[in-house]
Amino acid sequence: MTAERTLPTREYFASHPVLRTSDLDEARHRVGQKFCDHRLEIGNRRASLSVRHNAVRGLNLSVNYLSYGAEVSVDPGLLGSFYLFHLPLAGSTRIQHRGEEMTATPRAAAILNPDRTARLHWSEGCSKVLVQIDRTHLETVARDLVGAPLPGPVRFDMKVDLTSPQGRQLHRMVTACVEAVESGHLFQRPLGGGDLRAEHDLAHALLMLQRSNITHIIERADHQARPRAIRLALDYIHANLAEPITLADIARAAGINVRTLQKGFQRVFGLSPMQVLRNARLDTAHYQLLAHRDAPSVTEAAFSCGFSHLGRFSRDYKERFGHSPSDRQGLRAAGS
């Protein structure tokens, strides 16, 4: 059996620094701005704090490197708007969450849920990759999986056993994401369809591979393994967003007839293939317009995502996002 690919113990995303400080109050404030308000205490008052925080954000998630240097206790209360995947690179963290306690290490990651309190005790020298996933995004992917409204908040089991088959697969997904960001192939501006697909795939993998209170619903919904033809059709759609592709083109790429394709998409997504294509194009254009630097014009974003009629693009965009593509205030609100 081949060895699992693991992340080397080093500082990631150093070209995207957020914080360098030895001041406790500054660390509490600045890290809180990226995540949520929290209490932060040094375990040994004579120890020297040496915080290093780097982060790269997409539209629906961010990847972070964080190290405090010293032994610290963190009490964030409720995360509220996001899930947080903890992958220690070195050291360990003792975590209390959902009435349970575990120690996160390079062999046992952890996932914190938004609506349950948590307390964390970082060991001296602990460093982590943290994947912050927006709650609304994960719930959207979950609804697509079950094909119905969710019965309530999605709550994952806290411990992620990275030695199990499912844990190893999830670890590979996170590792691939980190390496793609580190090499400049993911979450660079302007953001594009590949970034949206990576965010979807990470949320999908978490829902499929980590036990939660909706795992039995996902399994019962028979979406655990989508038909290969649907996957081929989706791959073709995302690879050809800028091209004038037709329903017949998508069916041909999936190796099935048009009627079977339409029935399959309606069963899995509740949408036609062309509606899925339109939404993927709109999401990609929205993603590009959210860029803080080098954002394209509305016309450039529309044409680069396969829209040839600006009036129709503006109408569909407003219907999907609640504001026009030229509304910078609306874009800032969406990206905050």
Image: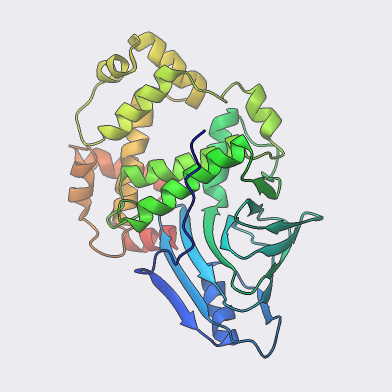
Q: Nearer the viewer, residue 151 or 193?
A: 193
The quarter of the picture where residue 215 lies is top right
Q: Is residue 154 above or below residue 45?
A: above
The quarter of the picture where residue 82 lies is bottom right
**74 to the left or right of 207:** right
**8 to the left or right of 124:** left
**265 to the left or right of 305:** right
The answer to whether residue 317 is seen in the rendering is: no
Q: Is residue 225 above or below residue 156?
A: above
The answer to whether residue 260 is seen in the rendering is: yes
- Please provide percent x and percent y for residue 220: 66, 22
Q: Residue furthest bottom?
A: 46
Q: Is residue 99 above or below residue 122?
A: above
- Please provide percent x and percent y for residue 314: 28, 45
Residue for point 26% across, 41% down? 313
Residue for point 53% across, 86% down? 22
**334 to the left or right of 290:** right
Question: Can you say which quadrant of the picture contains the C terminus?
Answer: bottom left
- Please provide percent x and percent y for residue 37: 62, 73
Q: Is residue 268 above or below residue 50?
A: above
- Please provide percent x and percent y for residue 113: 67, 53
